[in-house]
Amino acid sequence: MMELSPPGAVRWICRTLEEAGFETWAVGGAVRDALAGIPSGDWDLTTSARPGQIRRIFPRTVPIGVEHGTVGILARDGTLFEVTTFRRDVQTTGRHAVVAFSDSLDEDLARRDFTINAVAWHPLRKVMYDPFSGVADMEARCLQTVGEARVRFAEDYLRILRALRFAGVFQLTVTSETWSALVEAVPRMGQLSAERIREEMEKILTGHAQPSTSLSLYAASGVLAFFYPELDRLVGLPHPPETRMWDVDDGEARVDGHGQPHEHGQAHENDREGGAVRSGDVWSHALRTVDLLPRHRPALRWAALLAGIGIPEEDQGAGEVGEEEGRRTLLRSAAVLRRLRSSNARIQEVGGLAEWIGRPPDPSASDAGLRRWLSQVGRDRLPDLLRIWIAEARSDRLLRAAPEKGPQGWKVEELRRLARRLRGLSSMEFPLSTGELAFSGRDLIRMGHRPGPHFGQLLDHLLEMVLQDPELNTSEALTLEAKRWMKDWEAREGASAEGR
Ligand code: ATP
Ligand code: MG
């Protein structure tokens, strides 16, 4: 266990309250993280003082959730610490609990979700109070509810998602009673709000170097099928089909974060198709990629997670991704995130990346071909896409049977070379959209032409020409070509008008 060393302010708050006659303990995240041996910043205090008393004792307080008993106390350095009055549940609905204040630490600990979250530690006396053996559970790496699991999940179904998160983050095995109650309760999670479901997923994606551990448990428990059916479909779907051979598991440990031992049917269900497809399915590919992306970029992790959801229903696995599939990936990603009430900015960023993850340019393309590709994707997206592809390539290199090749069958070296070329090209000054051309619709009007849909066709044609040869992006060259094109167009129009 890690030494618990609270900030001075925590000891100051505790001392002030105790001197006023109120018992005060640290409970929750910080204590649990220390038990797991990881540093934590999240110091929550629990006390016998009522909110009104807390607010009279401290000079600077913030009423965070006074009706729930939580008061924020501002330390001298401006940090806010949350102090919550001892509570017990009087009524629960599955969505939230109605709480009453209590004078007893025991009652307060008894309403907490898991034993590892129900350990109290006294910041002054430096003693542990652990009536539910959370310390032993953390040592044994096991996760179980405080009290009867079935009852505790029914009180608040969010605890299901919290269990899967904690089990993944701390590499805990869920005990059999808790696991079977959890799986049984999954179908009743429908009443949880979108925001809480999203926040849990965001915590997995940002709070965790290896989200795959928690996400595998989402799949194994049925939570993935319940909240994210689009993703659940990817479990067992071969990726990519021609390399299906990799995946015949010969019993060796896999390097994909799914190797953790699970008791009692928690074994991940990635081998749905009779065991023929294992770590080479689209879902595990996505999980390995997510793990290799930085936790401070949840949008990249979301995009990698969602990248396969555009695979057509009739397909037996991931293959070449065309324009239509890219589009479908974009639409379905947006639908998932909208359902979770994500921000529009997030929906656009993730959808725009997911659309292109499966559609990289051909590494053997000419500069003109790469410029054409860049003009479709947009310069701004390039760095993030490269980052995701490199993660994908590394993720597939982790598969012993496919040592060198990336997801598109590239060698990692080949991808690096492509990345260098694309970076070089994208920083060069040349137009990537018709709006950036040295010629516009206004020039056409000035030349005496009447606007119409053919303006767009002409500008596309000019852009195509400039993507082939950026030197041609001058007013003279483009005006000349525009004149020629318009003459052809008028001739064609005239011919078809006569034909009518
Ligand atoms: P994190 O901050 O990473 O979400 P946490 O455990 O600190 O993890 P908080 O929401 O900060 O979660 O809650 C602090 C403590 O309150 C928890 O450690 C737990 O003891 C208790 N708690 C939180 N949510 C619940 C819940 N839904 N049911 C029961 N107890 C809970
Ligand atoms: Mg917390």
Image: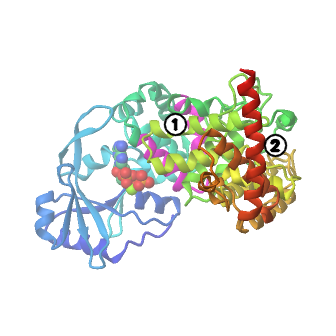
The residue where tag 1 is placed is 336
Residue 409 left/right relative to 28: right
Q: Give amino acid for label 1.
A: Val
Residue stretch rendered in magenta on the structure:
196-225
Quick check: 305 above or below 439?
A: above
Instruction: Check the image and tell me how it is coloured.
Output: rainbow
Front residue of 486/40: it is 486
Q: Which residue is nearer to you in this view: 217 or 458?
A: 458
Q: Secondary structure at mark 1?
A: helix
Can you give x and y, in whole percent of width and height, for residue 100 in the image?
A: 17, 44
Q: Residue 406 at x, y = what percent?
A: 82, 49
Split into 4 quadrants, where in the image is the C terminus? top right
Whether the magenta-drawn stretch holds residue 209 is answered as: yes
Q: Which residue is mark 2?
A: 252
Question: Which residue lies at the image location 61% right of the left edge and 31% below the top edge?
Answer: 232
Q: Say whether residue 113 is visible.
A: yes
